[in-house]
Amino acid sequence: MSKEIQLRLATIEDVPRLGEVIQFAYRGGKPKRSWANEEGKVTGIRTTSEELETLISAADKVIIVAVMSEQIVGSVLVEKEGSDAHIGLLAVDPDMQSNGIGRTLLQAAENHAYEEFGCTKFLMTILCGRDDLLAWYTRAGYSDTGKTKPFPKDTGAVELVSGLYFQILSKP
C-alpha cells in the first residue's frame, strides 16, 4: 500500500466519497474522532452532493483532493473572489490525520489560487472557539483579521452551543 499523497482536481464522480470525508472531518461519525472537527458545537450535514457538484462545475472554484492508495483522504476548496482567494472545506479523513495531508492540501490550495487564479491574498473562516485550529492556521502563516461572519441559519446545521460565528483569517 503506497503512502504517497497524490493531488488532483475533484470530478463529479468523486462526490460520494468527497461528501463522506468532509462529513467525517467536520461533523464526526467515525470511531476515531478528528482533532479539528466541529463535534460538540454543530451537528447535521456539512454539505450536500448538489452543493459539491455545483462547486466542482464552477469556473472560478476548484476542489483539490488528496488521494492515497486510490482513495480520497482529503480535500480543500479554492474560490476566486476578485484578487483574493477564499480557501475552505479543508478536510482530512480522521483515520488519516497527522500525516501531513492537511498541510499538503493547504499549500496546494494556495499555489492554485496564486498560479491559476492570480490571487494575492488568501482568506478563510473558522468556527469560533477553535483555539487548536486557529493555532494550526497561525503556524501556516494565517492571521486573525478581527472580523467575523455570522453562523448561517439556513443550512440545516444545528448549533449545539449558542453564539457561534466564524472568525476570518487572512494570509498575504
Image (cartoon, rainbow, N blue to C red):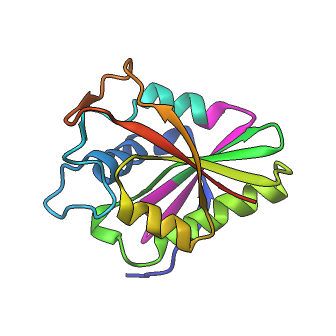
| 35 up-or-down from 13: above or below | below
Q: Residue furthest front?
A: 146
Relative to residue 143, is residue 126 drawn left or right?
A: left
The verdict on residue 172 being magenta is no
Picture coordinates of residue 104 (x, y %)? Answer: 56, 71
Q: Residue furthest left?
A: 31
Q: Nearer the viewer, residue 22 or 7?
A: 22
Q: Nearer the viewer, residue 93 or 98?
A: 98
| 23 up-or-down from 32: above or below | above
Picture coordinates of residue 61 (x, y %)? Answer: 68, 39
Which residues fall within the magenta stretch? Answer: 56-75
Quarter assignment of residue 171: bottom right
Picture coordinates of residue 100 (x, y %)? Answer: 47, 77
Q: Residue at x 38, y 23 (%)?
A: 155
Q: Residue furthest top?
A: 154
Picture coordinates of residue 112 (x, y %)? Answer: 74, 57
Relative to residue 164, is residue 100 drawn left or right?
A: right
**Which of the image's four quarters has the N terminus?**
bottom left
